[in-house]
Image (spheres, rainbow, N blue to C red):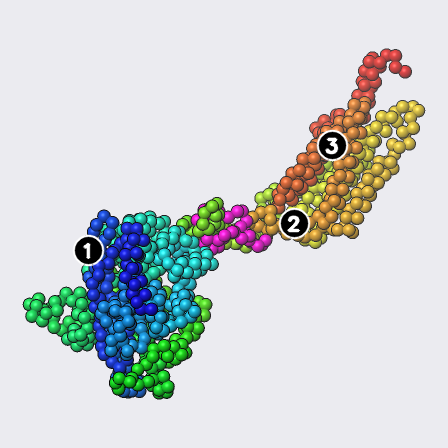
């Protein structure tokens, strides 16, 4: 198997180069450094410690060498060294057994990662298949895989030998597939709630228009799916999606295409998801592209503080970082303070780290000449070089060492899996026999956290929200500004300290990232056709509706007893109102009614005083009194419509109005009939003389009024009027009114009155030219014309009116029609009685009659 694998490795490099178009780097071959510490059992550690730096250029290829040391990743190496030393010092864990380790560098390259794995298997610095040195026989497991891509690359080779591989990078469900990766174990908590936490942050700051930048791989696509779903649930929209090619697919022009797209996005907030290696294009471009106006949300898996000396990270200043929570191992910082090249002279990585961080040469004489501090300490380094706190990845490495140690300890106790070598006294362990123990491993670490190796029991990650800040003096720092605890109850799972967050210089206050500005209260969101729901126009609420919150999808109606204020952002209580005597309109109408009623009474007095005069006695004196009394009641009936409606008022309003008007109109009808009968009675052989008595006209009035009384009685029995409210006619008021009840009865009353008026008008019109000294037919004709005009105009006006106006229209119609009857019929008679008394004598009547008869004889000389 190994010869075939070696052949594959030899052939893989040139083949991969030919398949890639314009690759970023072609790796130069040199020997990879390793750091080995002997022990009874050896743990392999694979960490990304070196970067590719472009050093040589050609038209088609850019040659790279691993000269740039990722100094900050050395924290992971020290976490493994610290854990191994702590285990070796523990008398209760692996007694009489020491752990050793061998550290390798890993690259974002399939070929170089497989080569490092093969070196681990062969035990040589050169990958020699089918060769096993002494160290290789002590190997028990591998700790590595800063990301799932590296873990998969390593597993493709280590799985052939069933070597246990514990990954410390972010949890990836792909690696949980025990069919394809039976020897891979994950320790990192599941990041399934990362998208939820990020969306919580967006919702808290009302960032509804957010751009996404992800790595173009399976894990990036999974995150994109999850965060899109959460954003859709919370009403946050995706402004744009940019995918960063993986390292092997990345071309030299990718940076020039991707960065302007991100900078040109209309979103002020950008979420970036990926690891340090896969997002190299945003950090280590040959042409720096500063983006200073964006707010970045990312994770600690992408550590942009790791960079070459001359690289600038101002673009990511004040970014918000979701970092997995991990407890601080108490003695870890004390251990870090003691680390220096003199303590670990065999550690080639530490020497390179020290030289890179402190810029000190390795040679002691040269170091003294350069005046390099002998008391240098890791604690003196800024954040970009080293973080004294234990990162989540270092914490996972620490737990991985202890997981292996406890698994080996159980083997040591049973000794059922241990065998002695035939060649020498020593302990030999077959690594694949650890799987049964690692798969069910569970223990409490030194800080009390429960550690699980069973992936079904691995908990969901909790996150600290850190603010990456670059101060004016260049100091970089991470400030905790909040946290997201996924398992807490709703409302307690997310917390943020806004006052602690430092935004970049472009934002004086909390930045906004929206497609459309929020619609304030009084407006609603009107979506733009064909665009995202986050892009909308703000429209004012319709009449009668309000919006009392920002960004409401639709306005809401106020209750019937409330109305919107001018801003249409809250409802105010309506005031109950009615046509009262105190308000100007009510006072005017009531005074007018009383004035006309008083005028009618005065006219009655005048008629009573001059009751024996010809003008009073003409056309039936009794009917004149009946008409005047009816008109006075008509004027007074209008007062029932003014004032607060009560049950009694509502019952009396329409019936009294209908009956009094019917009496008045029937009296006028009787008067016109009397005129016609009086003219016919002058003929010698006329039969009309017997109808000229008072009985016939009174009968007309009685019968006509009785019919109206019957209609009103049926109305009151079937569905009488009642007090009601009208909350709709006026926006700010509730109108107290009388509901007619049976509305058709109301129109029957009006129709019957109209029928009587039409009859009176017709008879009066026909009798207007009959010869008589005081013929009322002309005045009755005109009065009926006024009456009909008023009530014909009343119907459409009444139907179109609302609230108090409707009541006022009816009152005005009652007063105007009554005044028309009074003025047209009785004012001319009063004029004669009071101002022309000489006309109101029998001699004047006789004289006028004689004159008319002579005029008639001359006009018709042959008339018989």
Point out residue 424 in the picture as x, y percentages from the top left corner: 25, 85
Q: Which mark is residue 55?
A: 1
Vertical position of residue 539 compared to residue 206: above or below: above
Point out residue 660 in the picture as x, y percentages from the top left corner: 75, 42
Neighbours of disc 2 within 10 Å: few (<14), some (14-19), many (20+): many
Q: State yes or no: residue 538 in magenta.
A: yes
Q: Is residue 290 left or right of residue 359?
A: right
- Secondary structure at badge 1 equals strand
Q: CA distance from mark 1 to mark 2?
A: 93 Å
Which quadrant would the N terminus be assigned to in this image? Answer: bottom left
Q: Residue at x 84, y 40 (%)?
A: 703
- Secondary structure at badge 2 equals strand
Circle 3/circle 2 CB separation < 8 Å: no
Q: Is residue 732 left or right of residue 60?
A: right
Q: Which residues are magenta?
A: 535-563
Which quadrant would the C terminus be assigned to in this image? Answer: top right
Q: Which mark is residue 784?
A: 3
Q: Main secondary structure of the magenta part?
A: loop
Of callouts 1 and 3, which one flags the residue occurring earlier in the amino acid sequence?
1
Foreground mark, 3 or 2, reads: 2
Neighbours of disc 3 within 10 Å: few (<14), some (14-19), many (20+): many
Point out residue 624 in the picture as x, y percentages from the top left corner: 78, 35
Of callouts 3 and 2, which one flags the residue occurring earlier in the amino acid sequence?
2
- Secondary structure at badge 3 equals helix
Q: CA distance from mark 3 to mark 2?
A: 30 Å
Q: Residue at x 36, y 73 (%)?
A: 162
Q: Which residue is mark 2?
A: 737
Q: Residue at x 41, y 75 (%)?
A: 454
Vertical position of residue 122 compared to residue 626: above or below: below
């Amino acid at each position: 198997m190994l010869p075939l694998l070696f052949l594959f490795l030899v052939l893989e490099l040139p083949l991969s180069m030919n398949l890639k178009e314009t690759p970023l780097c072609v790796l130069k071959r040199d020997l990879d450094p390793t750091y080995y510490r002997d022990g009874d059992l050896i743990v392999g550690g694979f960490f990304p410690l070196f970067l590719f730096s472009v050093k040589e250029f050609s038209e088609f290829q850019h040659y790279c060498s691993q000269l740039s040391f990722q100094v900050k990743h050395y924290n992971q190496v020290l976490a493994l060294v610290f854990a191994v030393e702590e285990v070796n010092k523990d008398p209760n864990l692996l007694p009489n057994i020491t752990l050793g380790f061998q550290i390798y560098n890993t690259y974002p390259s399939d070929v170089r990662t497989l080569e490092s794995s093969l070196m681990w298997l062969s035990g040589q610095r050169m990958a020699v298949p089918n060769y096993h040195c002494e160290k290789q026989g002590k190997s028990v497991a591998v700790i590595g895989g800063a990301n799932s891509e590296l873990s998969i690359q390593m597993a493709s080779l280590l799985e052939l030998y069933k070597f246990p591989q514990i990954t410390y990078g972010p949890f990836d469900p792909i690696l949980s597939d025990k069919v394809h990766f039976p020897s891979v174990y994950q320790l990192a908590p599941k990041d399934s709630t990362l998208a939820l936490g990020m969306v919580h942050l967006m919702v808290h700051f009302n960032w509804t228009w957010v751009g996404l930048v992800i790595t173009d791989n399976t894990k990036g696509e999974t995150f994109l799916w999850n965060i899109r779903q959460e954003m859709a649930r919370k009403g946050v929209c995706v402004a744009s999606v940019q995918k960063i090619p993986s390292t092997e697919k990345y071309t030299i022009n990718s940076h020039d295409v991707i960065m302007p797209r991100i900078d040109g996005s209309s979103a002020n907030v950008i979420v970036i998801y990926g690891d340090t290696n896969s997002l190299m294009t945003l950090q280590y471009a040959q042409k720096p592209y500063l983006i200073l106006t964006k707010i970045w949300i990312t994770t600690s898996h992408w550590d942009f503080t790791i960079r070459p000396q001359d690289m600038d990270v101002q673009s990511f200043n004040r970014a918000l970082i979701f970092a997995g929570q991990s407890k601080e191992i108490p003695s870890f910082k004390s251990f870090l303070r003691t680390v220096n090249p003199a303590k670990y002279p065999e550690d080639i990585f530490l020497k390179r780290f020290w030289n890179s961080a402190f810029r000190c040469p390795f040679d002691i004489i040269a170091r003294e000449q350069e005046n390099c501090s002998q008391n240098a300490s890791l604690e003196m380094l800024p954040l970009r070089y080293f973080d004294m706190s234990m990162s989540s990845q270092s914490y996972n490495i620490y737990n991985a060492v202890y997981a292996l140690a406890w698994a080996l300890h159980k083997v040591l106790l049973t000794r059922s899996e241990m065998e002695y070598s035939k060649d020498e006294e020593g302990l030999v362990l077959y690594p694949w026999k650890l799987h049964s123990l690692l798969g069910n491993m569970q223990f409490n670490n030194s800080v009390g956290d429960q550690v699980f190796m069973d992936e079904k029991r691995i908990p969901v990650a909790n996150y600290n929200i850190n603010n990456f800040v670059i101060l004016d003096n260049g100091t970089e720092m991470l400030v905790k500004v909040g946290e997201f605890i996924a398992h807490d109850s709703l409302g307690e799972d997310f917390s943020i300290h806004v006052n602690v967050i430092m935004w970049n210089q472009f934002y004086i206050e909390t930045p906004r990232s929206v497609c459309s500005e929020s619609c304030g209260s009084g407006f609603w969101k009107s979506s733009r056709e064909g665009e995202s729901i986050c892009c909308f126009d703000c429209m004012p609420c319709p009449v009668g509706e309000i919006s009392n919150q920002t960004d409401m999808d639709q306005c809401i109606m106020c209750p019937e007893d409330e109305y919107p204020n001018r801003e249409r952002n809250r409802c105010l209580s309506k005031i109950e109102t009615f046509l009262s005597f105190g308000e100007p309109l009510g006072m005017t109408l009531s005074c007018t009614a009383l004035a006309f009623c008083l005028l009618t009474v005065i006219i009655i007095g005048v008629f009573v005083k001059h009751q024996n005069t010809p003008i009073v006695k003409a056309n039936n004196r009794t009917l004149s009194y009946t008409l005047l009394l009816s008109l006075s009641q008509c004027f007074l009936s209008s007062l029932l419509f003014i004032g607060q409606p009560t049950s009694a008022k509502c019952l009396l309003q329409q019936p009294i109005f209908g009956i009094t008007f019917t009496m008045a109109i029937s009296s006028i009808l009787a008067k016109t009939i009397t005129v016609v009968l009086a003219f016919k009675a002058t003929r010698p052989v006329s039969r009309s003389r017997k109808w000229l008595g008072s009985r016939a006209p009174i009968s007309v009035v009685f019968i006509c009024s009785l019919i109206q009384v019957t209609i009103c009685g049926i109305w009151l029995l079937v569905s009488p009027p009642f007090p009601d409210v009208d909350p709709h006619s006026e926006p700010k008021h509730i109108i107290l009114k009388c509901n007619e009840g049976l509305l058709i009865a109301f129109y029957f009353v009006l129709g019957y009155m109209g029928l009587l008026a039409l009859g009176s008008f017709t008879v009066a019109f026909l009798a207007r030219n009959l010869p008589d000294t005081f013929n009322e037919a002309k005045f009755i004709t005109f009065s009926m014309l006024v009456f009909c005009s008023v009530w014909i105009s009343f119907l459409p006006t009444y139907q179109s009116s609302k609230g108090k106006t409707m009541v006022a229209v009816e009152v005005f119609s009652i007063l105007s029609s009554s005044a028309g009857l009074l003025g047209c019929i009785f004012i001319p008679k009063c004029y004669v009685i009071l101002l022309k008394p000489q006309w109101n004598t029998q001699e004047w009547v006789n004289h006028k009659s004689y004159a008319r008869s002579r005029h008639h004889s001359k006009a018709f000389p042959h008339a018989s």
